[in-house]
Amino acid sequence: MSENFASFYRKASSVRELVDKAPFPEKARFQITKVIELPAKQYHRYMNELLRDVSFISRNVEDMRFDGKTETFLCLFVTCRDANTGVLVESEGFGYARYAAFIPEKKALVLDGIPVEHANEKCLRQRSVPER
């Protein structure tokens, strides 16, 4: 199994904030426990709302933690089937991305054998405007 490293940030509100931050002096080791695949519109909306409580994180809190023995973030990888990017999420038991790391090229990750959950978040759907 290859080792993976990324720069995790605490309480970033969006991917733009993750990208704009200067990287930590050293990157942290991570292991993906589950891939969360969102529909395209919801994925793009989530990228701007990382501090929003979402059910796919709440459902998977047991799969995320920081393993102090191996100094590894056990995390979810949130992406979209048609996107080349994604976000690593570790929630520390919360319903939002307490720690997050942006992955600019998901092809660099080995995702074979990792469970995939196809999520459809009501809170991330485009709100319809009532007709007048």
Image (cartoon, rainbow, N blue to C red):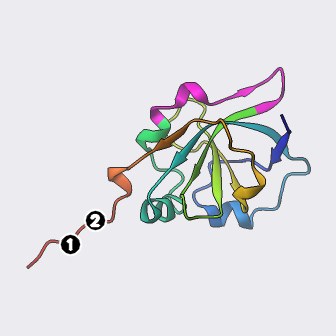
The quadrant of the picture occupied by the C terminus is bottom left
Residue 127, image x, y percentages: 28, 65
Label 1 to label 2: alpha-carbon separation: 6 Å
Q: Give the structural element (helix, strand or loop) at label 1.
A: loop
Image x and y of residue 129, in percent: 20, 72
Above or below 120: residue 72: above
Q: Which residues are magenta?
A: 58-72
Residue 68 lies, with reference to residue 116, above or below; the image says above
Between 69 and 86, the one nearer to me in the picture: 86
Look at 75% across and 49% down and name the residue there.
109
Figure quadrant of residue 53: top left
Which residue is label 2 attached to?
Answer: 127
Name which residue type carries label 1. Val
Which residue is at the far bottom? 132
Q: Are marks 1 and 2 in contact (CB under 8 Å)?
A: yes
The residue depicted at 77 percent of the width and 38 percent of the height is 30
The one of 56 and 34 positioned closer to us in this rendering = 34
Query: Residue 63 location, x and y as percent?
Result: 59, 28
Percent x, y of residue 25: 91, 51
Q: Which residue is mark 1?
A: 129
